[in-house]
Image (cartoon, coloured by chain):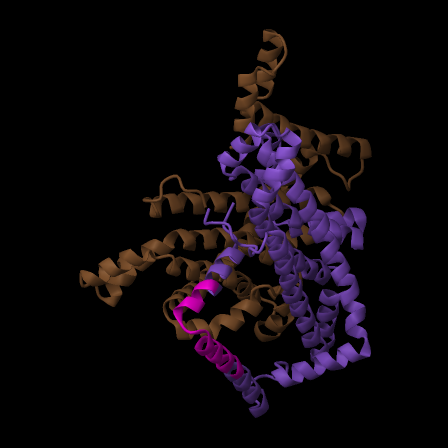
Chain colours: A brown, B purple
């Protein structure tokens, strides 16, 4: 770590001035947990200050947001809409994973498929697929189907690209060894290629989950009466920003927990890559 | 943070050339593309697909028509203005703060919890609340785009600065370089490839958010235009809008890649390793 080195150099040259008591206090203040807590407290404090100074309903303080959150929770509305958002979102993600994962693996191992799909990936990847949403509504209607399809579409490329890279990341020596010991195509796939690709597959999943949440929120803003996105749009249209922020915080918590689950799962499944970060 | 998609994409391109000769790959690529377009066109001509699914030729015609009439330019202007200002503000602040967080533990710790709580929020969810405060204006749109563009740039720049080879810093110190000089001449260049990966993700997110913020609420711009065309049943204009959005995404991505190659000393934006 860069600063550790610079810090060490300073300590050796004795460039840190100050009395021992002053140094003790600043050491506590500058310790990691204290600083982290201070940083968060500063942000929350600034929010609260701004809310108090402004004093309108449009800029709710933390306690008002908390009350709105509890209210939504007691009504059962929050859980109901969250369940809808999550089932649809993860359904889209699952479809995307099946199709993109399969295509990614095949393209990585077969140069004809690779060449055929190449232009579509190059041009399709940087396109905001959200622009296609009207076409998808025309095809599937405004129900759950169009939202699931939109999630699957938007998550396709990140998952495809990571599965592809993973299936390419097999060490050649491993592959030669497997072939020499007489492993068939199936064993090569299950025992060599899939394990080598798994870290990449999990990275793809980790990239795709936040995209799924974005797409679900946006599509629920448009012409729906279900889901967390709808709940936000409805609250905002009643100028009830406190409830809107409460739902936003819920979405953040969902994103955070999902990410932790993916990381935890990766640690269990790809147990041989201990300590490697995503 | 996660490995970027762009890195994997680059890996893909590089290795697909190893797999087969360049000419044969090129031939298959173009043949398959033409085949897909031809099948699509044939299906629309036969009339198997519903009337609102246009064929490629029809879409191209609608696009040219709308572009000639000047409608498309009138929509693209405000959209690009929002997407690019949001992108520049968000990613510039992100890279600067990220590099600072990379070299200073104090700074990194101060932002750590706030960052890890706010990062998982889909930033578009803030848009209705921000729109209540600032209205459905350019200001609120640019703000949401900038917030979204901030995170990938910040995290990648920070990780880039953290991942610098310690020897480079020892050399700088031994040569008697000041902290400021070390930062600008060692840390910034060494962290640049990774930071640019983040900037590229920021750009892609900016365009997604551009469409998302325009689809919601009354607005002008490409996203609003294509949503309006959908409601009015003017499918030609809708497809033209979709093509325009796609072109914006592809062109800006290509431009950024060029810039990154120049800045990164001949390397692609995406040279960072896995992890």
- Kindly give the residue lying farthest to the bottom in the view shown: B46
Q: Position of residue B220 (x, y in %)?
A: 79, 64
Is A189 on the left-hand or right-hand side of A258? Answer: left
Which residues are drawn in magenta?
B14-34
Please tell me which residue lies in front, B19 or A234: B19
Residue shown at the point (70%, 84%) measured from the top left: B61
- Give yes or no for residue B26 being in the magenta stretch: yes
Q: Position of residue A245 (x, y in %)?
A: 67, 43
Q: Quadrant of residue B256?
A: bottom right
Q: Position of residue B51 (x, y in %)?
A: 63, 84
Residue shown at the point (61%, 34%) measured from the top left: B182
Is A148 on the left-hand or right-hand side of A191? Answer: right
Tell me, yes or no, if residue B189 can be seen here. yes
- Give yes or no for residue B256 being in the magenta stretch: no
Residue shown at the point (56%, 39%) measured from the top left: B161
Q: Quadrant of residue B138?
A: bottom right
Please tell me which residue lies in front, B53 or A140: B53
């Amino acid at each position: 770590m860069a600063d550790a080195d610079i810090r060490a150099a300073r300590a050796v040259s004795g460039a840190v001035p100050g009395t021992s008591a002053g140094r003790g206090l600043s050491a506590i203040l500058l310790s990691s947990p204290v600083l982290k807590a201070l940083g968060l407290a500063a942000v929350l404090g600034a929010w609260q200050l701004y809310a108090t100074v402004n004093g309108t309903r449009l800029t709710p303080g933390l306690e008002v947001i908390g009350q709105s959150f509890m209210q939504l929770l007691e009504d059962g509305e929050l859980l109901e809409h969250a369940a809808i958002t999550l089932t649809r979102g993860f359904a889209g993600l699952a479809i995307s994973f099946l199709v993109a994962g399969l295509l990614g693996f095949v393209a990585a191992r077969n140069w004809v498929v690779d060449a055929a799909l190449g232009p579509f990936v190059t041009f399709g990847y940087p396109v905001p697929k959200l622009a296609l949403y009207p076409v998808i509504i025309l095809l599937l209607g405004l129900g759950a189907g169009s939202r699931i399809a939109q999630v699957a579409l938007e998550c396709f490329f990140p998952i495809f690209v990571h599965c592809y890279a993973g299936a390419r990341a097999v060490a050649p020596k491993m592959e030669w060894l497997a072939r020499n010991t007489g492993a068939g195509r199936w064993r090569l796939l299950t025992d060599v290629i899939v394990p080598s690709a798994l870290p990449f597959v999990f990275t793809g999943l980790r990239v795709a989950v936040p995209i799924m949440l974005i797409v679900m929120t946006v599509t629920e803003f448009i012409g729906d009466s279900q889901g967390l996105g709808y709940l936000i749009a409805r609250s905002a249209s009643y100028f009830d920003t406190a409830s809107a922020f409460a739902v936003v915080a819920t979405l953040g918590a969902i994103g955070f927990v999902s990410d932790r689950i993916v990381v935890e799962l990766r640690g269990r499944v790809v147990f041989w890559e201990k300590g490697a970060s995503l | 943070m996660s490995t970027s998609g762009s890195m994997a994409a680059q890996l893909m391109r590089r290795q697909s050339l190893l797999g087969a000769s360049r000419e044969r790959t090129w031939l298959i690529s173009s043949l398959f593309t033409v085949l897909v377009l031809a099948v699509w066109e044939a299906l629309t001509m036969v009339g198997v697909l519903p009337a609102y699914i246009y064929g490629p030729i029809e879409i191209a015609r609608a696009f040219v028509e709308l572009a000639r009439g000047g409608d498309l330019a009138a929509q693209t202007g405000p959209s690009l203005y929002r997407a690019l200002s949001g992108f520049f503000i968000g990613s510039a602040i992100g890279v600067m703060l990220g590099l600072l967080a990379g070299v200073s533990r104090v700074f990194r710790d101060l932002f750590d919890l706030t960052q890890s709580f706010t990062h998982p929020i889909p930033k578009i969810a803030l848009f209705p609340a921000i729109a209540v405060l600032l209205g459905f204006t350019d200001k609120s749109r640019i703000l949401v785009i900038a917030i979204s563009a901030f995170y990938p740039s910040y995290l990648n720049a920070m990780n880039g600065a953290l991942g610098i080879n310690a020897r480079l810093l020892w050399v700088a110190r031994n040569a008697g370089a000041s902290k400021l000089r070390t930062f600008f001449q060692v840390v910034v260049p060494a962290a640049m490839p990774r930071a640019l990966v983040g900037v590229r993700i920021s750009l892609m997110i900016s365009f997604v958010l551009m469409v998302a913020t325009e689809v919601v609420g009354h607005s002008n711009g490409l996203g609003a235009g294509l949503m309006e065309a959908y409601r009015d049943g003017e499918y030609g204009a809708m497809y033209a809008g979709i093509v325009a959005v796609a072109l914006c995404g592809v062109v800006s991505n290509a431009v950024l890649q060029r810039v990154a190659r120049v800045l990164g000393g001949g390397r692609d934006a995406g040279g960072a390793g896995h992890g």
